[in-house]
Amino acid sequence: LRSGKPVISNHLSEETRFRTPELLVQHGIRRAMNVILQGNGRPFGVLEVDSRSERDFEEHDLAFLQGAANLLGMAIERAQQQKSLNAALARQRVLLREMDHRIKNNLALVASVLNLQAREADDPLLTQHLDDAASRVRAIARAHDRLQQDVQVETLDVCGYIGRVCRDLDETIAHCRIEAACEARIEIATSRAISTAMIVNELVTNAAKYACRGGADDSIKVRLARKGPDRFTISVRDFGNGMAQPLEAGASKGLGKRLVGLLVRQLEGELAIHQREPGTEIVVSIPLQGRADEIGA
């Protein structure tokens, strides 16, 4: 360590450069060699080989030991870097949880403010608009909260995610059953999840408002299916009276319907409407990955 160079001693009993440890003497060690165990910027220590044999250590033995020491040094460095990375990731998770908690609280605060404004408004139409806005904010909060339950970061299983969103809607909408069905796992970019959930929320809410009258058979079915190698579809169908004014992309003055059209265009999707017996079915076809996602990738 002092010289920064390897050391060979083939005669420890006659060594004058350094003191031979008593432990080596007790075990009959005759010769030893040491090499630097180099770290990043400074040595970790030394790597030593001891021998009781008659054969002397030679330069090629030293080269072999130095190679082993280099590998060991790299392994130690990697372990230390992994430890630092794990600590950084743990802190990042804490920060993300804190950020998610703040987002959830802020959305809840916005919804509460809208509800207060709705109660103070004298105009019934304005009250309804404010209540609808508060409902949408709460829907975003629920969709965001469900998004955090997925362990993946860049992609997620949209089937499981929308299934959780539909269960929330089923608990929220009392006069109509909400059922979700899906094919096998369908992966989408996480950045597209909230918009997808909001489309489902608006379509289900619209169907419950206009098509379900609280009858025993009133229900809304949400189905997800893969469509070819690079798209998937979301189908929302009511089994009630059907919508008196079915959704028309870009043609309606209703905020919810315009919002659906905006979200579908944002996801580069397509929307189709089918009158069924009974009810109405709205099908949205969405790419698994958009152009913006591809540029980011």
Image (cartoon, helix red, strand yellow):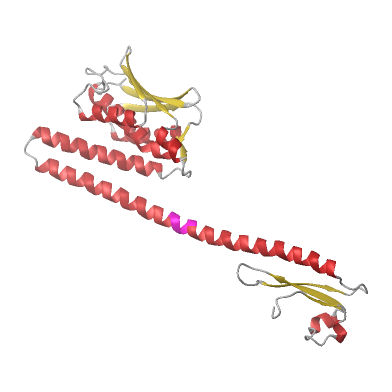
How many numbered circles does the render carry? 0
The residue drawn where x is 89% and y is 75% is: 52
Q: Residue furthest top?
A: 277
Determine the residue positioned at 80% across, 74% down: 33
Span colored in magenta: 89-93
Res 74 quadrant in image: bottom right
Identified at 49% across, 22% down, the residue is: 228
Above or below, 54 relative to 103 = below
From the viewer's side, name the closer residue of 167 and 64: 64
Residue 258 percent coordinates (x, y): 24, 28
Q: Residue furthest right?
A: 54
Q: Nearer the viewer, residue 74 or 273?
A: 74
Q: Quadrant where the N terminus lies? A: bottom right
Residue 119 in the image: state x and y as whole percent: 12, 42
| 134 vs 261, nearest the viewer | 261
The verdict on residue 281 being magenta is no
- Is 261 displayed left or right of 49 in the figure? left
> 77 above or below 180?
below
